[in-house]
Amino acid sequence: MFRRKLTALDYHNPSGFDCKDETEFRNFIVWLEDQKIRHYKIEDRGNLRNIPSSGWPKSFEQDGTRKDY
């Protein structure tokens, strides 16, 4: 199921995507913001780009729940 959706989004590796791999999931979120959503200015994406950060989930939660878009 994910493969078809990722292919439709033109994701670079739809068949190799592992949604259970936290790093891969975080990278996908950054790719999605960079390539498809583009809600935030590039300079405002720093918290999402900091993939290994222990604060990443909080940044994702805050960015993902904003109601202004």
Image: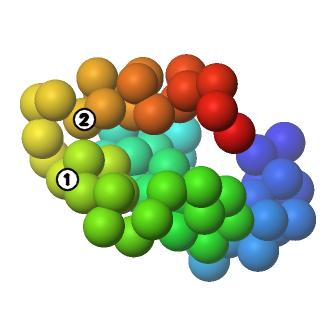
Comes first in the chain, label 1 or label 2: 1
Farthest front residue in view: 68
Q: Quadrant of residue 10?
A: bottom right
Q: Is residue 60 above or below residue 17?
A: above
Whether label 1 touches label 2, CB < 8 Å: yes
SS at mark 1 in the image = loop
Q: Residue at x 84, y 53 (%)?
A: 5
Where does the image place residue 17, in percent across and percent down from the top left?
57, 55
Q: Quadrant of residue 38?
A: bottom right
Q: Residues within 10 Å of mark 2 (few under 14, many from 20)?
A: some
Q: Residues within 10 Å of mark 1 (few under 14, many from 20)?
A: some
Where does the image place residue 1, in percent across and percent down from the top left?
84, 42
User: Quarter of the image containing the C terminus?
Assistant: top right
Observer-nearest of 2 and 49: 49
Where does the image place residue 21, in percent across and percent down from the top left?
39, 40
Q: Quadrant of residue 63?
A: top left
Q: Residue at x 32, y 49 (%)?
A: 48
Q: CA distance from mark 1 to mark 2?
A: 7 Å
Q: Is residue 65 above or below residue 2?
A: above
Left or right of 40 on screen, residue 37: right
Count all numbered tags in the image, as a single digit: 2
Q: Amino acid at mark 1?
A: Asn
Q: Amino acid at mark 2?
A: Trp
Observer-nearest of 6 and 69: 69
Q: Residue at x 30, y 67 (%)?
A: 43
Q: Which residue is mark 2?
A: 56
Judge whether residue 28 can be spotted in this image.
no
Q: Which residue is mark 1?
A: 50
SS at mark 2 in the image = helix
